[in-house]
Amino acid sequence: MFFFQTTRDNGIAYLIWRWILRKQGAISALMDSFYFGSSRGMNDYNKLAARYSGSNVKPDKQFSILPTVMRMLGPLSGKTVIDYGCGAGFFTLPIAEAGASVVCGVDNSEAQIKLASKVAHHPLIHYRVGDVFTQQGGPVDVINVPFVANYARTVNILRRFFRIAFNSLKQGGKAVFVVDLPNGRNLERFGAIKSLEGSMVDETPICIDLFNAGQQICTLNAVYYTPETINRLLLEVGFTSVEWHTPIVSQEGIRQYGQDFWGGYLRDPELGYLTATK
């Protein structure tokens, strides 16, 4: 299991302290950072940065995930935005180009931030290395949170992460989330195959294989949480409303691949799209 891949020679001590402090999300998140480093024991994006950037041209990411996120973000003119887990700036740059006054892209991988600074540069974007599971930012108007929640190792760490996002928003601000919800479909032609390594319950590991045009890009690890748990935790930390959204496919995606290609995708893309308002 991926959570044994510690960067220090005290994995047993980690497991003992994790059990003792299992209800302490803040301490557990700091402990994860200490034991696992920036990779959090799942995916070393310092090594994966170049390969993972190849996922930016996957059909689902270009023509459904990006336009769906931009639609959920809404009008951005004059707004301040943090892009959590910004990677190489795939979402960060379109957010800046949509008129945001200031955009901060945050990622725990130095290699990702260096890449973003080169390929997704914009005068209104500020990139920085940071751990969004332990460090609070803002306050800002909007936080973009694609795929980051599934890197919380436990329910209590996820709750703590949602609280950090809540505290980083201005009153009335909005957080936009994309979460993995695998259920056994083969979505390789769209860009991903996601496999649950156990039952469909909270904290079950997920294996994610990313593809483009039949070629595998890389394999990632994540953690599953039910929509019910995600909804409950967001409300527990103080968000006043949570709304789940239906994804879209852009007209460019339909023109490039055809309507038949996308058949069935929007009904079940194995992704959850939601907004939470403070």
Image: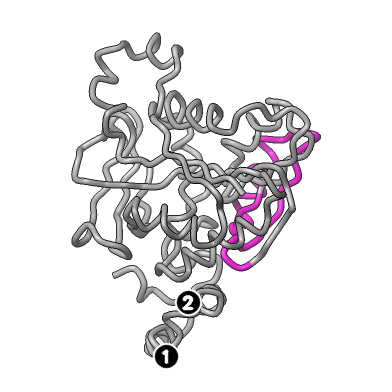
Q: Residue at x 40, y 9 (%)?
A: 255
Q: Is residue 253 above or below residue 127?
A: above
Numbered circle sitting on residue 78? none
Question: Which element carries disc 2, helix, strand or loop?
Answer: loop
Q: Amino acid at mark 2?
A: Thr
Whole-percent x, y for residue 43 in the image? 44, 59
Between disc 1 and disc 2, the foreground one is: 1
Whole-percent x, y for residue 240 in the image? 55, 50
- Residue extent of the magenta highlight: 106-134
Q: Residues within 10 Å of mark 1 (few under 14, many from 20)?
A: few
Q: Is residue 240 above or below residue 25?
A: above
Which residue was labeled with disc 2?
A: 7
Q: Is residue 245 left or right of residue 173?
A: left
Mark 1 or mark 2: name the one nearer the start of the chain: 2
Q: Residues within 10 Å of mark 2 (few under 14, many from 20)?
A: some
Question: Which element carries disc 1, helix, strand or loop?
Answer: helix
User: Residue 126 magenta-drawn?
Assistant: yes
Which residue was labeled with disc 1?
A: 13
Viewer-nearest residue: 232 or 255: 232
